[in-house]
Amino acid sequence: MLYLNAGSRDGLSAMSGTLPHFLQEPDDAYIVKSNPIKLRCRARPALQIFFKCNGEWVHQNQHTSLEHTDLGTGLKIREVTINVSRQQVEDFHGPEDYWCLCVAWSHLGTSKSRKATVRIAYLRKNFEQEPQGMEVPINGMIVLHCRPPEGVPAAEVEWLKNEELVSSLEDINIDTRADHNLIINEARLSDSGNYTCLASNIVARRRSATATVIVFVNGGWSSWTDWSECNVRCGRGVQKRTRTCTNPAPLNGGAFCEGMSVQKSTCNSPCPVDGGWAEWTLWSVCSSECERQRTRECTDPEPKHGGRLCDGAALDTDNCTGDLCIQDRKLLHDVKVPQADMESTNDVALYSGLAAGVVTVVVLVIAVMLYRRSQSEYGVDVIDSSALTGGFQSFSFKSARQGNPLLMNSSMQPDLTMSRTYTSPICFPDSMEKELIPEPALFDPLPDLKVKVHSSFMVSLGVSERAEYHAKAPSQTFPRGVVQEIGGGGGTLGGRGKNQLTPVQPTLVSSMTTGKRPLRTSGVFGHGGGRLVVPNAGVSLLVPHGAIEEDTTWELYMSITQQVSSALSDEGQEILLSPEVTYGPPGLTLSCPVALTIAHCADVSSEDWNIKLKRQTQDNNWEEVMTVEEESTNCYCLLDTQCCHLLVERPGCYALVGEALTQAAGKRLRLAVFGNMEPNFLNYSIRVYCVDDMPHAFQEVVSVERGRGGRLLEEPKTLLFRANSFSLQVSIQDIPQFLWSIKPFTTCQEFSFSQVWCSSQSPLQCAFSLERYSPAANQLSCKISVRQVKGHEQILQVYTTVAESEKDTVPFFTQSDCTITSQTGSRAFRIPLSIRQRICATFDTANAKGKDWQLLAQKLHIDRNLGYFACQTSPSAVILSLWEAQHQERGDLDSLASALEEIGKVQSKHSTSVDTLDRISKTIPSGDSTINCSSEELDANHT
């Protein structure tokens, strides 16, 4: 026993003579916020352990030591810890990070531990690279890049899709290991969503901006269907087959299929063949009944394809004994002959009666026509005659109705269901109650008694009735971009028809485009602003209050150029959609934009146009300002149905041009029909005009008709003309056949597509000359059909009284009498200045939810291109100026008051804002009633 104990002590002494061995060395640590960290060392055998940080010994008082003996070896194990604070790390300024190590002593010497670094942990807020949204075709590759914010320790990255964690372990199609990027090898529809990069470390967690990924599918054609049956039962026809863009159907904005969905081919249907009899066979042998027979077959030709069978009997019988064969003591021939004689007698009587009836009808018709021509005052007599009730027109008397005072004959109420009126400014109402001097009306009222002709006669639009044009039109009468399709010699318009006749050819009113001064108006404006209007042109200029400096006045002008436009590009794809409007003077300086309103003729109900705003430069070239749909900080464009409202700051000449993107793009045409008697008092001239649906263009037509002594015969109507390359046809229909006549083959006239599509500067005109049979025929009723081939059609109903002595003067519309083309100060605005200032003060101030003016723009439906308003000194003032320009005719303030009330409900958490908006909305009355509240009262409400 003693031996063992002695040996044990010798072993312990030997082990205690070894160098210290570290059982635990200090680890790298991070200080989070202001929390200190602990560094720990443990060694055996160790008499002492001290920490050394950054080359300096840590004071013994900062050490915490624990000592115990290993029961297995009997050696002393010492454990020491120290605290390192954030201040210590921040105060250290060395080439390395803050570090510490342990030094342990034993009887034989010292040992050092590894260096442990101590760093302050952080994670910055901004990502070095955030993922960007993208649109990817199906089966394409999606790569979303993400570089997390700088941090200590380095941040780990995770991906969220629609706020759910994305795991590459669950989906082998997704890889998130490549440098924090998210890679989807083959995009699926289910991969569409909102992706977020999530970076985190021991300090914080950061989220990137959301990237929207859209996986789209481009459309693909299905297989062609079988060919349809031929559309005719006989001869050459057309058959078609179709396919649909459903293999696959376009999804998520994918491209629609390119190509045609319908394919047509010519076909030949066999015509029906009526059957025909073949030759008779030879007579058969005489039978016991003294008869012989022969037959024939319906095989020359056989009936085919639904043709009729042969008429008549296939079997023929005859007596074969020379009438010597007797039945019942009578010759067989004697028995059958009387029946045949009776049938012959009946046929003669029938045909004789029919011939007598035809002769009687012809004689009656000739007698009636001679009687009608012999009567001098036959109008009422023929109408009341009961002898003409069959086969001729029937007339009915109708008393005059109250109609449109602008029409020559107002007894017939015009069809306004298809016509459109302008809401753009014509002119200001004259504030002075002056007595208007009566002027001969452009459209005289009809007498009390009217005759309306109901005729079933319709002018055919077939090939034989369509007019052909061989006279070569002067080149200067064509507008820009029109290809002349009217050639000399044997050329025809459209190449249809065979009748070599030359009717009155539709023309371009070239006199309207040359030698004319521009429409112009001017006015003097100061700090109070105002409004300037070109009468009857749909063009106006709104100068806001404060746009011109105080104690400064400018004479502003506006003009409409009526020469051939140079704003179109050389490619020939663009057409002019508005007049060229100039406002100035050129040196005008303004502190805020003005609102310029210009009428246009584009059909903006669909997205088939690429409409641009252009401005003329000093060297008379044209530059593109913006496209209507794009975001711009230089100009704002609000496109309404018939007008375009522009916010511009630079004076100059502006115009809208458009390029049709599809064949569905259309522009509006205004149709008008005028008429007057020709000098011989027998012919009546009807002129049909087709102009772009803009007020100033129609006023040119009225001005020309005034010089011709014309009368407007029907309320002007509008027609939608598509960009489908088909022509425009104008035809006259339902002319009373026995009262008026028109030259053959002149009932239909035609304009080529290019003439109509590019006719912005030159109104189109075609004329019809009617000749009356007698001077007593003073009533004219007919229809004018204006239609685009494979497009829309409009009917103009002419119903007028023809007088031999017509007045020579043709006045303008009654609106042309107004002389006020400018208004200044508060009278020019719908919103009073005091309320306008309160609205601007309220909405230009930022609140917790952002800029209030953005909500104002949204409620007033002016929420596009908000970046333009953000660049303005007072966004609310510019928004209200645009609202004023948009509502200058209606003047209804209800929509503004309703918008303020809705904003008050949305901003219910901001009591001051709600109270202010509620007070403002209550001070805005309905309609045009005057706002009776002083500026002092309004300013008191706004605190």
Image (spheres, rainbow, N blue to C red):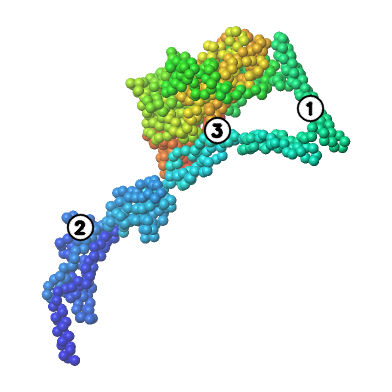
Amino acid under disc 1:
Ser
Could you say whether the residue bearing mark 2 is in a helix, strand or loop? loop
Amino acid under disc 2 = Asp
Residue sitting nearer the eye, 673 or 643: 673
Residue placed most toward the observer, 464 or 406: 464
Residue at mark 1 = 344
Q: What mark, if any, has residue 97 been given in the picture? A: 2
CA distance for labels 1 and 2? 136 Å
Q: Residue 335's x, y, as percent?
A: 84, 33
Label 1–label 2 contact, CB within 8 A: no
- The residue under the point 44% across, 39% down is 258
Q: Is residue 452 above or below residue 573?
A: above
Q: Is label 2 in contact with label 3 (beta carbons under 8 Å)?
A: no
User: Quick check: 36 left or right of 925?
Assistant: left
The amino acid type of the residue labelled 3 equals Arg
Q: Position of residue 97 (x, y in %)?
A: 20, 57
Q: Residue 537 at x, y = what percent?
A: 49, 21
Which one is closest to the eye, mark 1 or mark 2?
A: 1
State the image quarter where residue 589 is shown. Answer: top left
Point out the residue furthest to the bottom here.
1
The disc, 1 or 2, on the residue closer to the chain's N-terminal end is 2
